[in-house]
Amino acid sequence: MRSNASQALPADVDALAALPVESLPLSGLQELIATLAPQAARLAGIVSRAVGELEVRSGGQVPAGASGLVAPTAAWLREAAHVSGRRAGQQVRTAVALRELPQVRDTIVDGQLTPEHGRVLARLVGRIEPAALLAAQPDLIEVARRCDPDSLAVYVRHLLA
């Protein structure tokens, strides 16, 4: 069953895709980009949250079409999202890891961090004691807010070293 929001989103995206960007002034292009980029990141965070839930709830095997066959979540995601197998596997691993960092995951969905920040912070899962990692989330989020994902990756490598 589809929610009203998931039914409205494609129509909204279609309307945005129909915008004649070539006729927008520079300020209009900047405004469009500044408005849409954070929302695109939020949508990616929402998809990631759903992928993690799908992987965990399904035990990693999901129905793959009308045939009744099942496939690994990453294989299904590769087809559903039209991404490479490597990218689909990375998305599943990150999404599952972010379940262990619920404040980080929610901060991405809220648009305060990017999915790239989440991928970097997900590297800490399994490498730092779970209770300590949960407790450290507010500090990790604060550090991530102050820097780009590449700088955050340097910080995470330092923590792991």
Image (tube, rainbow, N blue to C red):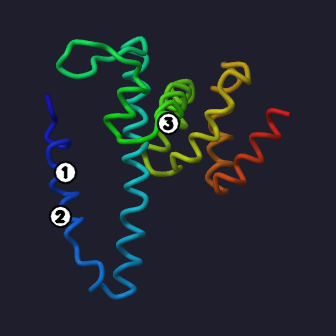
Residue at 65% over, 47% down = 142
Judged by depth in the image, the label closer to the viewer, 2 or 3, is: 2
Give the structural element (helix, strand or loop) at label 1.
helix
Q: Residues within 10 Å of mark 3 (few under 14, many from 20)?
A: many
Q: Determine whether 54 is above or below 91 in the image.
A: above
Instruction: From the viewer's perspective, tell me whether residue 13 is left or right of residue 62.
Output: left
Which quadrant: the C terminus?
top right
**Relative to the observer, which residue lies in front, 120 or 147?**
120
Cα distance between the residues tagged 2 and 3: 29 Å
Asked if the residues shown at circle 3 and circle 1 are in contact, with their CB atoms under 8 angstroms apart, the answer is no
Residue 78, image x, y percentages: 39, 34
Residue at 71% over, 46% down = 153
Q: Residue type at mark 3: give it.
A: Arg
Residue 115, image x, y percentages: 51, 45
Q: Quadrant of residue 146?
A: bottom right
Q: Residues within 10 Å of mark 2 (few under 14, many from 20)?
A: few
Q: Which residue is mark 1?
A: 10
Cα distance between the residues tagged 3 and 1: 24 Å
Asked if the residues shown at circle 2 and circle 3 are in contact, with their CB atoms under 8 angstroms apart, the answer is no
Instruction: From the viewer's perspective, tell me whether residue 132 is left or right of residue 17.
Output: right
Q: Determine whether 94 is above or below 132 in the image.
A: below
**Which comes sooner in the sequence, label 2 or label 3?**
2
Q: Residue type at mark 1: give it.
A: Pro
Residue 15 - label: 2
**Which comes sooner in the sequence, label 1 or label 2?**
1
Residue at 56% over, 29% down = 101
Cα distance between the residues tagged 1 and 2: 9 Å
Q: Determine whether 10 is above or below 78 in the image.
A: below
Residue 105 - label: 3
